Image (cartoon, rainbow, N blue to C red):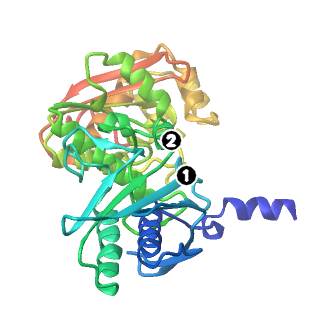
Amino acid sequence: MNEQKKRNKKDPSQMRHGYTTGACATAMTKAALQALVVGKVPDEVTIYLPVGQYATFKVTAFEVSDRRVMCETIKDAGDDPDATHQARIQSTVCYSKEKGIHLDGGVGVGRVTKAGLPVPVGQAAINPVPRKMINGVVQEAIEKFKLDCGIEVIISVPDGEEIAEKTLNGRLGIIGGISILGTRGTVVPFSSSAYMASIVQAINVAKESGCEHLVITTGGRSEKYAMQQYPHLPEEAFIEMGDFVGFTLKNIARKKIPRVSLVGMMGKFSKVAQGVMMVHSKSAPISFEFLAGIANKVGVDEEGQREILRANTASQVGEMLQGNEAFFAALCKNCCYYALNHMDTDMKVSTTLYAMNGDCLGKAENIDKLDEDDWYRG
């Protein structure tokens, strides 16, 4: 029974979806505006989500004064490991003498300070779809209650500044809190689309910041080593691509950034060296035959090649051959060749491989053309 529960817990099809900060902010705006007009705070409100379904949100706290109402809900991210899970999302509404809808961010909602994001510099980090959703429920109320005035809406997240420290907002130039996000209204557990969207945003910000050399890494540890390797580059130049190597490279190529460096470790980069551009553990197994072939190419003896074939992990192969500069240079060159081939554009590509402890295993720098004689295909 316990084993069955364990399996279900890991099965994405069994996981519970949640709601975005944008959906929560929209629902609380509807609740607060209804309370402002009719004089009674509702226990819950229902809104229509961009994904094409209705969702109901509980009002967990509220404050009422003569001309202002604040309603709050607790964000439920479902089974997604979201930094904003259980965050308090508030909307405060009041009447305005100036006609129209006036939306802004309050405490804990970040403000945009760098170009390249979907929100202009200087505005609250409330993304376009949540803005549209919030404006939609306000306009609906204006028409329903025949209001002859403007409406001011302030979205706040009391713990937003603290939560933002767990995100990349600071690097993207979103200062003072979190972003109000969501294109669907729902949060899909372990969603690839959300991560990919963050990669695109990071590339856009880097481009608008004038970066001509980007460094892409597979995670926090490899990024730490990359920052030590390229200390002269600004923070915006470093992008965590996770498993999405090909997707990240394609988007960098679209932005016509002239130089990119890949920094990572044996496990994922031994796959890139084979031409695998989605390096999740389930996407493709490590090919020890391929690694043995690279070893053969650079003159590793037959016993060394047999040891590679008996290895359990790519990291173990890295440990076996640590110090063999030719092997790691060949592996890094292969990563560069496949990256250039994937992007199909003029660009300089570098690759650096690190061991888990931070030792540099090898590198290939500023490869700008394919060398068919040198490119090992297995």
User: Can you tell which mark lies on residue 87?
Assistant: 1
Place of residue 65 in the rendered image (x, y in percent of width and height, measured from the top left): 47, 60
Q: How many marks?
A: 2
Q: Residue at x 35, y 29 (%)?
A: 332
| Left or right of residue 342: residue 157 | right
Residue type for callout 2: Ile
Q: Is residue 228 above or below residue 66?
A: above
Lateral position of residue 130 relative to residue 41, left or right: left
Q: Image quadrant of residue 208? A: top left
Dot 2 crowding, Cα within 10 Å, few <14, some 14–19, many 20+: some
Would you say residue 32 is visible in this rendering?
A: yes
Tell which of 370 and 239 is nearer to you.
239
Q: Residue furthest top?
A: 323
The image shows residue 82 at horizontal and vertical percentages of 54, 51
Answer with mark 2 or mark 1, whichever residue precedes in sequence: 1
Q: Tell me the distance, in whole angstroms, between the alpha carbons under discs 2 and 1.
A: 8 Å
- Kindly check if marks 2 and 1 are in contact, taking CB atoms under 8 A apart as contact: yes
Residue visible at 34% across and 61% down in the picture? 153
Q: Is residue 290 left or right of residue 208?
A: right
Looking at the rendered image, the quarter that the C terminus falls into is: top left
Density class for disc 1 (Cα within 10 Å; few <14, some 14-19, many ≥20) is some
* Res 163 label: 2
Q: Residue furthest front?
A: 66
Q: Secondary structure at mark 1?
A: loop
Who is closer to the viewer here, 200 or 318? 200
* Image x and y of residue 4, in percent: 80, 65
The image quadrant of residue 260 is top left
Residue 19 at x, y percent in the picture: 51, 65
Place residue 337 in its image quadrant. top left
Name the residue rendered at 26%, 24% in the picture: 234
